């Protein structure tokens, strides 16, 4: 069986897994794909969650050149404002609860497993405002 999956289906499944009360009660300005933007296209104010692809797909094959799985890597992080790390840590924990070890649901695909493979934590200074980024990189494996 050869496998092919549109990235928009995968990203819709990630969004659905992240856009839950356990996260949105902490990240009150929502969950965003790629860029943290509000409804008017302006930068969202923290706290919010953003996810983006960092590896758009590594294909795995059997003998005979049959593709049986595709592995994606996504950066998923909460962004908060200020030097304190408590809220960023709470959002990070909620992200991990929502994604790590979870089978994401996409119609027509047998197994989708999401696993955290590395942590991300860093501050950012932007024109005198301090932001805290905290989350992880998640490997998503799709089998047909």
Image (tube, rainbow, N blue to C red):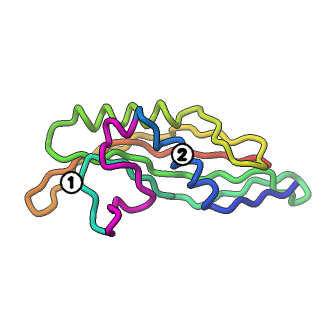
Left or right, 139 with respect to 137, comes to: right
Q: Residue 128: horizontal and vertical position, in percent? A: 8, 58
Dot 2 lies on which element? helix
Q: Is residue 31 above or below residue 101?
A: below
Q: Nearer the viewer, residue 44 or 53?
A: 44
Residue located at (50% from left, 34% from top) = 98
- Is residue 39 shown in magenta? yes
Q: Nearer the viewer, mark 1 or mark 2?
A: 2
Give the dominant element type of the magenta stretch: helix, strand or loop. Answer: loop
Residue 36 in picture, x, y percent from top left? 34, 59
In the image, farthest residue toward the front: 39
Residue 84 found in image quarter:
top left
Q: Image point 39% across, 52% down: which residue?
A: 50
The structure residue drawn at horizontal position 11% and vertical position 63%, both measured from the top left corner, is 127
Q: Return the residue nearer the eye: 124 or 111.
A: 111
- Residue at numbered disc 1: 124
Residue stretch rendered in magenta on the structure? 23-40
Residue 86 in the image: above or below residue 57: above
């Amino acid at each position: 069986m050869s496998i092919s999956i549109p990235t928009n289906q995968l990203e819709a499944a990630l969004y659905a897994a992240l856009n839950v009360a356990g996260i949105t009660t902490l990240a009150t300005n929502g969950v965003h794909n790629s860029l943290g933007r509000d409804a008017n296209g302006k930068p969202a104010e923290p706290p919010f969650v953003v996810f983006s692809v960092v590896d758009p797909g590594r294909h795995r094959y059997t003998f005979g050149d049959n593709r049986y799985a595709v592995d994606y890597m996504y950066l998923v992080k909460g962004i908060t404002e200020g030097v304190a790390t408590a809220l960023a840590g709470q959002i990070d924990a909620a992200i991990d609860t929502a994604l790590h070890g979870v089978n994401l649901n996409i119609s027509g695909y047998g197994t989708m497993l999401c696993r955290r493979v590395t942590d991300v934590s860093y501050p950012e200074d932007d024109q005198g405002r301090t932001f805290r980024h905290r989350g992880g990189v998640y490997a998503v494996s799709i089998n047909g």
